[in-house]
Each structure stands twice: as C-alpha cells, then as structure tokens.
Image (cartoon, helix red, strand yellow):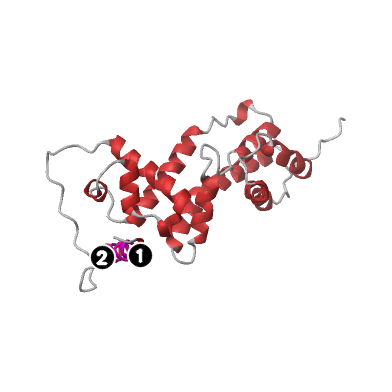
C-alpha cells in the first residue's frame, strides 16, 4: 500500500471511529474476551519508539504503518490490536516521549535552592531536547502539519509545551511570593523568552543544546526580574 493510499485509509478509519455508516454515533466495541494472551509492554514500547524515530525522519505525512512495524519487528495485526489508526498511534508516541522526559527531570526542591538556582533549573527543563536529541525535528514536523492536522499540533502544544512553560511560570510566582522576584515582573514574557531561546539556538546552530544555555539566558534576565534588595537599616 502506498503512503497516499495508507493515508486515505487512515482518514477513513478516523472518520469511522467518530460516526457510524449512517452518521450516527458509533457502537461501542465488544468487550474483550476473558483470558487470552496478555499484552507485552515491551512490544508496545518498541512500536512507540519506532514511531517516534520515523516521525523525526519522515514526519507525520510520510510515516507509514508498514515502516513502523518493520522497524519495530512486529506485524500489522499486532499494531492494529493496540491502535486503530496512524493518528492514534502518533498521539500515544508523543505522550510516551513526554512521559519519559518528565521521568528524567531531577527533583526541583526549591526549599534547598537559592532563587537563582531554582530559576535556572526551571529554565533548563524547558528544553525540548532534554532527554531527546530529536525533539526539535519532532517539533518542526508537528508545526509543519499544523494546517493539515491541527489536532496533532494541539497535542504537542497542550501536552508538551504548555506544561513545561507552566512549571517555569509557577516557579517564578513562588519566587515572587518570597520576595525574590519583582511583583510587577511580566512573567508571561519571561517564560516566552526562555522557551524561545532553545528554538532560537537550534535554528541558529543546528547543534545540541549547549550545557550552559540555561545559565546564560538566566544571567541576562535575572537582573531585570529580581526584586531590589532593601537597604540595611
């Protein structure tokens, strides 16, 4: 099956999952039969990892189920028992990668950090390439599909980017609460500048994130956002 034909079949499966043949709500699938062979998590992980690798090299439009099952060393029925279509597979592959990234984060214990250290660590976690060197290619591919597959782009934006940015905003608000960051600081602009620095660095250099990028970005912004020290009485 060609990529074009497979894409058409994928679209048909997605539509069928939303409505029945007569336009009515689809019937619920039959309940699984008791017993049988339990699913092997290692197989599912192999499929998800193969999907992510193909997304980085081929993008969503050119990714095919045939390539994924070949790379994962499984069969089409094995994949389709777990995912109804390419879109659902790609969404799960995205969430799999985001979960692995969150698990790789070190603890953010603000009680044991100085305000500058907490700010820097929160900025370091913004890096899409944290724990995944291919993340920028994945972002580029999802952005390239924003008009054709807006739901896919929203998955990346809502579940991938917003939580990272929200963590930095939360850290800055806590620093405001303890008087370390100015009460009138534009936190939204700070988060945007910090997050954008990783994309800017990649687009300029095409290389892996420098180890000191978060430190350099924070060194530029900290004098602007930190609260002024009160003079000693």
Per the rendering, the mark at residue 16 is 2
Residue 84 falls in image quadrant:
bottom left
User: Magenta region: which residues?
Assistant: 5-13
User: SS at mark 1?
Assistant: helix
Residue sitting farthest toward the front: 2
Q: How many marks?
A: 2
On screen, residue 39 versus residue 119, left or right, reads left
Looking at the image, residue 158 lies above or below residue 25 = above
Q: Quadrant of the C terminus?
A: top right
Q: Is residue 141 magenta?
A: no
On screen, residue 33 versus residue 128, left or right, reads left
- In the foreground, 65 or 127: 65
Q: Earlier in the sequence, mark 2 or mark 1?
A: 1
Q: Position of residue 166 (x, y in %)?
A: 56, 47
On screen, residue 105 versus residue 182, left or right, reads left
Q: CA distance from mark 2 to mark 1?
A: 18 Å
Q: Position of residue 26 (x, y in %)?
A: 22, 64
Q: Quadrant of the N terminus?
A: bottom left
Q: Is residue 87 visible?
A: yes
- In the foreground, 23 or 55: 55
Residue sitting farthest toward the top: 112
Whether tag 2 and tag 1 are in contact, CB under 8 A, the answer is no
Name the residue carrying label 1.
4
On screen, residue 178 versus residue 12, left or right, reads right
- In the foreground, 29 or 213: 213
Looking at the image, residue 156 lies above or below residue 147 = above
Residue drawn at x 71%, y 42% is 217
Q: Position of residue 229 (x, y in %)?
A: 81, 36
Q: Position of residue 204 (x, y in %)?
A: 68, 49
Category of crowding for the residue at label 1, using alpha-carbon neighbours closer than 10 angstroms: few (below 14), some (14–19), many (at least 20):
few
Residue drawn at x 68%, y 39% is 213
Q: Is residue 94 visible?
A: no
């Amino acid at each position: 099956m060609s990529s074009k034909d497979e894409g058409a079949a994928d679209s048909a499966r997605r539509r069928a999952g939303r409505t029945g043949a007569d336009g009515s709500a689809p019937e619920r699938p039959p309940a699984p039969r008791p017993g049988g062979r339990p699913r092997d998590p290692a197989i599912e992980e192999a499929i998800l990892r193969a999907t992510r690798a193909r997304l980085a090299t081929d993008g969503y439009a050119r990714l095919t189920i045939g390539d994924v099952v070949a790379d994962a060393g499984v069969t089409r029925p094995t994949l389709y028992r777990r995912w109804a279509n390419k879109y659902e597979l790609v969404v799960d592959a995205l969430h799999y990668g985001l979960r692995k990234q969150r698990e790789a984060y070190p603890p953010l214990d603000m009680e044991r950090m100085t305000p500058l250290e907490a700010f820097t660590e929160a900025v370091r976690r913004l890096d899409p390439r944290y724990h995944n060197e291919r993340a920028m290619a994945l972002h580029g591919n999802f952005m390239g599909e924003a008009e054709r597959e807006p739901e896919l782009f929203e998955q990346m934006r809502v579940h991938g980017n917003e939580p990272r940015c929200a963590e930095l905003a939360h850290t800055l608000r806590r620093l405001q609460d303890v008087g370390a960051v100015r009460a009138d600081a534009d936190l939204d602009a700070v988060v945007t500048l910090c997050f954008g620095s990783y994309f800017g660095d990649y687009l300029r250099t095409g290389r892996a994130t420098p180890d000191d990028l978060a430190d350099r970005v924070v060194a530029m912004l900290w004098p602007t956002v930190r609260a002024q020290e009160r003079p000693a009485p």
